[in-house]
Structure formats: C-alpha cells, structure tokens
Amino acid sequence: MKNCIVIILLLISFQTYSQEYIEIIKPDIHIRMLPSTSSPIVGHAFNGEVYITNGENERWYSVLLPSGESRWIYKRLANKIKFNTDFSSDFDVLEIQEKLKSASDQANRDSNEEVIKNLNKIEINNILFDRYVLWVLQDYNIWPVFYQNIINYSEPEINKNIQMVAEYMVSVDHIDYDLFKIDGYNFYIETKRCFKLGKALDAIISMYYEDKDFIQKLCFEDGYGKGFFNCYNIKNIYSSVLEEPNLVVLTNDGKMKKTGLVLKEALLELPVSTY
C-alpha cells in the first residue's frame, strides 16, 4: 500500500457555532505548555496558521493541540477569526498518516530519555507528540486545525474480508501511559496513544482478520449506552512475570533502570463473553 499514492480532495466546511479559532499573525512564535513565557516550549506556530481555541485569559489564548492537551499562545501574536469558509486542497493522506504514526512512535521512544523539570513521563510524551506532529503538518503546509480530518480519514472499504476471531467483554484498569490491566486476570494490554484514565473501565477486546491482516483493538464507550466505538489498536499483550517494588532491570541498550513490574509477551486466553 505504501507504493500506492492516494490523493483525495478534502472538502471541509466549518460552521461558526460555538467553536472559535485564532490565526497566527507573526512569522514564527512559541507555543507554550502553560500561560507563561518561562513555561516549556511545546512547538512553533507560523504566520497564517489556524488553531482551535478553547479558552483564554487576559494575555493568552488556550489552543487545542493534537495530543488533546490545551497549550498557550500569547494574545498579541494571534487574532480571533471567523472560520466559516470552505477549505479545499489536495492531500496525500495515506503518506501523511504514515508520517504522523512515525512521529507518535518517535515521541514514545524519546520520552523515555527526555527530562523536563517538574514534568512526568506522560506530560513529556504529550509535549514531544505535539512538537513532532506539528513538524509533520507544517512540512505539508497543513494547518493544525485539520489534524483530526487527516487522522480520521480511512480508505473506502472495498471487498474486504472480515473474519472474527474472538471478542471479549472486560473491565480494565489504567496502569501507565498506554498500558491497561484486565481486572481479575494476569494480562496487560499495550495500546497506541490511548488517553483513557481510571479503574474498572468497561471495554471490549476485538480480534479479527481483515483480509490477511490480524487486527486487535481495545474499544471503550464514549458514554453510557453509546456503544463501544472508541477503539485503539493493541500493540502487545503481556502477562506479569514479577511485581514488587524497587526492582532493577537491564535494558537492551545496556542501561540499568528501576521498575516495579516485569512483563513478558503472552497469548490472551479468556472465557468467551456472553454479553
């Protein structure tokens, strides 16, 4: 599929409704993590770019970035605009999606080594994710306001053969960034960029073949009774080998690191759901 260039014409109509937007009016400005010039720099914004704004204070606009986090832009560097005109452009969407996936994977790797004062791993990962994704969008001259349109695009399904393997109704606990434990079982699920937090979260694990590709997804409800359509790809399934405080492990790159949990890859074996 990488050898096939798929060009689609995105015709996106935006109505004003309650959504507000800002346009950058300076050549190159900083996007900050918090509304302060001493706050960490998340990335750069450039003249003419349009961002979704979800709040403001006396001096700063709050903007929604791809990680889902609110970041901050100094008010004198941007103007509020009415963004209600049609936008059209030719995008090589599949190529951009691949670049965005690579940016996400790179953020996950780099967050293991990056140190930013007073920030935990999840916060650092989100900063790096926003920074790397902005680089990709800016390389293609795509405004950040269109990020979700790029991510949500999928090819029309033409004669795809779906063969269900298994489906399990489970309850999961958030353990760490992109890691969940199945309640009552020694199984851990690693997902791709899932921001669900909490304990005893109802979910469905779905496993199936799409043509020759084996797919595993962890799906949540967006709200009670709305169906399990908020799905995330499963990267790996693990079981716990050892769990106790103050363990030290040797990583593949020769570094000693403290941990409280040692996992190994496993095959998921659960009772068949009867929901």
Image (cartoon, helix red, strand yellow):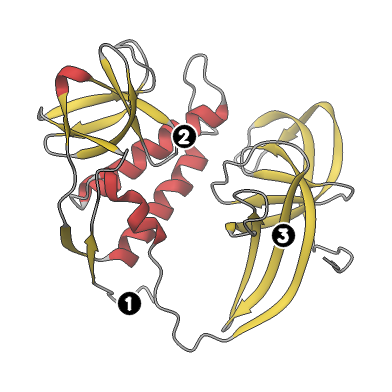
The residue indicated by pointer 2 is 126
Which residue shows up at 17% across the image and 56% down it? 87
Residue under label 3, please give it: 204
Q: Amino acid at mark 2?
A: Asn
Q: Amino acid at mark 1?
A: Asn
Q: Which-is-in-front pick, marks 3 and 2? A: 3
Closer to the N terminus: mark 2 or mark 1? 1
Q: Quadrant of the C terminus?
A: bottom right
Q: Element at badge 2?
A: helix
Secondary structure under tag 3 reads strand
Q: Which of the marked residues, 3 or 2, is nearer the chain's N terminus?
A: 2
Instruction: Answer yes or no: is residue 99 visible.
Output: no
**Amino acid marked by disc 3:** Ile
Q: Residue at x 28, y 44 (%)?
A: 144
Which residue is tagged 1?
Answer: 3
How packed mark 3 is, by other alpha carbons closer than 10 Å (few <14, some 14-19, many 20 or more), is many
User: What residue is shown at x 11% (from left), y 34% (from top)?
Assistant: 47
| Residue 193 spot, x, y in % from top left | 54, 47
